[in-house]
Image (cartoon, helix red, strand yellow):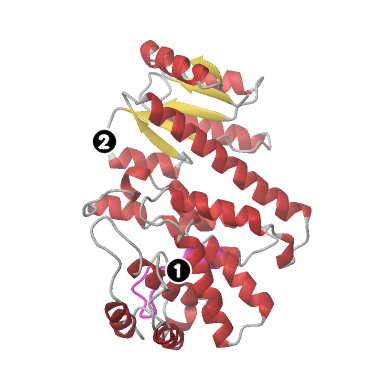
Amino acid sequence: MDERVVVVDDDTMILKQANMVLTEAGFKVTCLKSGRLLMDYINMNSIDIILLDIRMPEMDGFETICALREWEKNNSREAVPVIFLTANEDSDSEAKGLSLGAMDFIRKPFSSEVLKIRIRNLLDLTMLQRNLHMEVNKKTAELESLSLHVVHTLAKTIDAKDAYTNGHSERVAAYSREIAKRFGYDKDRQEEIYIMGLLHDVGKIGVPDTVINKPGKLTDEEYMEIKKHPAKGAEILVTITEMPKLVTGARWHHERYDGRGYPDGLKGEEIPEEARIIAVADAYDAMTSHRSYRDISSQDYVKSEIEKGMGTQFDEKFARIMLEMIGEDTEYTMHE
């Protein structure tokens, strides 16, 4: 292991603890006491990940990440993943940090194991994203050019953030492909929507684990964080210009046919057809998966909810295909 981690914090004790924990875990660690020192450091050194304190004198964490992103843009450098270190439980700070490009938050004082796991997960995820871009850039815009292995691995990494959605992306992708097949899509479009389904929740990369895995009811602020994931997903996938339709599933799978969805409040035929299909598949899997507060819903209940949502939440023609699939599943095997 030779990943290079830079820890930026004005607290000497935090630097010493992080240095000890991460060095023992095999990382190459550099400790800096200010954002200005970080900006000097990046001019001469390569970095794989940054742990950045929010509250620092002269140049706080928010100012530092803004300066970092501007420097990367001006120097045509790839964005270095940033995890904010914070002693606060302030959701506004988390929202601001995420909007500025941070990938995660770690509370201080931190657990040594949590610190190592979060860094390892983010580094692995970053590598998967790089592999995805490399696969697309290496080949043509044809669908078969995208490595399904890489996409499957990325989908599993996304689902792993949520303790209650194991395999969610793959099931949504499979249901979406079957709906598309029954609706009349040719094989190429079926595979295209399958990949859209695999990556529809990619924006959850930017949602804190504490929000995703909260066992009880979300606060209004936490719900607003969850609602950011479609737009965040679109931001991630829009860079894959060879497959522009990937954005469709990520951005619009929470739109509603009656126009009361998010993030854009699209209505009816304004919503791309693939997103209308994924919306039905996503809702079905949500009801037929375990949650912290309930078991898998009964098949009759799921059927009634799909029927209830026809013409309001769902495009009726795709909801009817989903109901047809439910009707054929006499042993109720189509669930988590």
Question: Badge 2, how many Cα within 10 Å: few under 14, some, many 20+?
Answer: few
Magenta region includes residue 254:
yes
Q: Amino acid at mark 1?
A: His
Q: Quadrant of the N terminus?
A: top right
Magenta region includes residue 218:
no
Q: In the shown orientation, is residue 126 left or right of residue 256?
A: right
Name the residue nearer the viewer: 147 or 45. Answer: 147
Name the residue nearer the viewer: 138 or 264. Answer: 138
| Residue 302, placed above or below residue 39 | below
Q: Residue furthest front?
A: 331
User: Where is mark 2, residue-wise?
Assistant: 89
| Residue 161, placed above or below residue 32 | below
**Residue 154 % position (x, y):** 56, 51
Name the residue nearer the viewer: 280 or 265. Answer: 280
Question: Badge 1, how many Cα within 10 Å: few under 14, some, many 20+?
Answer: many
Q: What range is drawn magenta here?
A: 247-261
